[in-house]
Amino acid sequence: MSSVILRHTIRAIILILIQVLILKRIGLGTSWIALNTDIFIYPLIIFMLPFRAFRHYVILIGFCVGLMIDMFYDTIGVHAFALTATAYARGIMLSYLEPRGGYQLSMNPTIRSLGLNWVLTFTALSMVIHSFLYYTAEIFTFVYIGKILIKTVMTTTLSLAVIMGYHYLFNPRS
Amino acid sequence: MNNLLQFVIRYSAFLLFLLLEMAALVLVIRYNENQKSIFLNSTSILSGKLYEMTEDAIHYNRLQVTVDSFASETALLKEKIFNLERSLQKVSPAEKPLDSCILESFKVIEARVISNTVNQRNNHFTIDRGKADGVRKGMGVISPHGVAGIIDQSGEKYARAISVLHSAARISASIKRNEYFGSLLWKEINPGYMILEDIPKQADIFEGDSIVTSGYSFIFPKGIFIGTVERFWTEGGSNYYTVEVKLHEDIARLDQVYVIDSIEKDSLPQ
């Protein structure tokens, strides 16, 4: 049990470091894509949590991870807002995407365990929610709804690519 | 209590989610200049609208106070106008000295009509000012659109006035255009009309001429607009016109009136 917690903690630290040290810099630039895109890998911390994780813990973890990212991005509360909602939505989505026969104890949200289709659907939906809420909280007015939607689409696409790359590169077991 | 507890347990994940989202939003607004300004801007629009609505309601409640203050202000202004006109008349010969008693020969007291009749042979109305406010017998009462009557009895706090619609009321009035004057009285025809008598036949009158107070009686200052000429005729063989005057003020709806205290009247030899 403690090894599971340790594995997730280490993964969380590494993903947060990748996010704030590498991916944050990719967002800097003056090109159209750089201006309208961020690449988020840290929601993966939430996506990779085991199915049997208590929902309240997931929501709390989402809030804490979001706050940590915010500290590095100097946008206190914005990532926390988006990731808390994503963590809550994860529970709802899991019940909708439940495979026939329910989740088994041995199942993990990975390609190896549930297949590409399931992981792709789950990640894409979660990323749409996360990006949309993130830009809503960042821009904070629906006057620029067009800009919010463009950024949501761009960010979801690129982040999805990066997260799927992670899945294929490391092919984690849990 | 049990139900509430069950509700909390059942939706605890959702409640936690709401709580954390609220905390995140508070942080967003608290620590981000851009979002903070947008938030403050939007709420100020909302609260501004709310304040405006309450202000409207309070304002409506205070209308009576506002109206009263306007009335006393109007009384002051009228007083000034009358005195100014009076002093202008006096000053024009140029020899006469400017005296303070000339400058301030009228005092105006604002009052409110508390009872009124128009349908009797002799009509009276009562105002809510009396001796305590300086209202005495014989003072003239004017209304915003004309003359209203003359004080008849003055009590400590209330005073009764004979209305212009009274057989004993005779008001010295003149045609504004050429200053021919006569007495204005009421012939019990209609509360909206009065008769102006004793206008000499050589006066040229037109229908619609303005009738104003003449200022010869000291009861009313000169030049208060009373009404307009409706029609005029000569009673068989008379050398004077009889003029029917349509009153500008609806006496039946008297409300705010002003009592005119002519100081000069007292200095006149009786």
Image (cartoon, coloured by chain):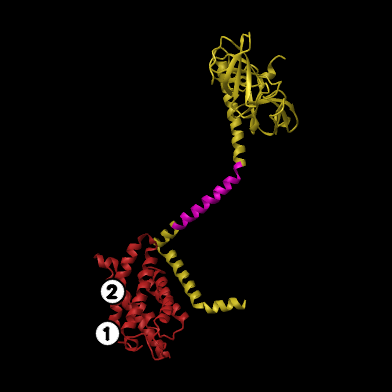
Chain colours: A red, B yellow
- Residue B122: image tag: none
Percent x, y for residue A89? 42, 76
Q: Residue at the spot x=65%, y=25% of the render?
A: B190
Drawn side of residue B72 relative to residue A42, left or right: right
Alpha carbons under labels 2 and 1: distance apart: 16 Å
Q: Using a 10 Å C-alpha cutoff, classify the residue at mark 1 as few (fewer than 14 neighbours), some (14 to 19) or many (20 or more).
A: few
For residue B113, above or below residue A36? above
Mark 2 falls on what kind of element? helix
Do badges 2 and 1 share one subunit?
Answer: yes
Drawn side of residue A6 relative to residue B147, left or right: left
The tag earlier along the polypeptide, 2 or 1, is 2
Q: Quadrant of residue B269?
A: top right
Task: State whether residue A84 appears in this view.
Answer: yes
Q: What residue span does the magenta drawing correspond to?
A: B42-63
Q: Residue at label 1? A: A169
Residue in front for this viewpoint, A156 or A104 = A104
- Residue A158: image tag: 2
Q: Chain of mark 1?
A: A
Residue in front for this viewpoint, B267 or B234 = B234
Looking at the picture, which amino acid does disc 2 mark? Leu
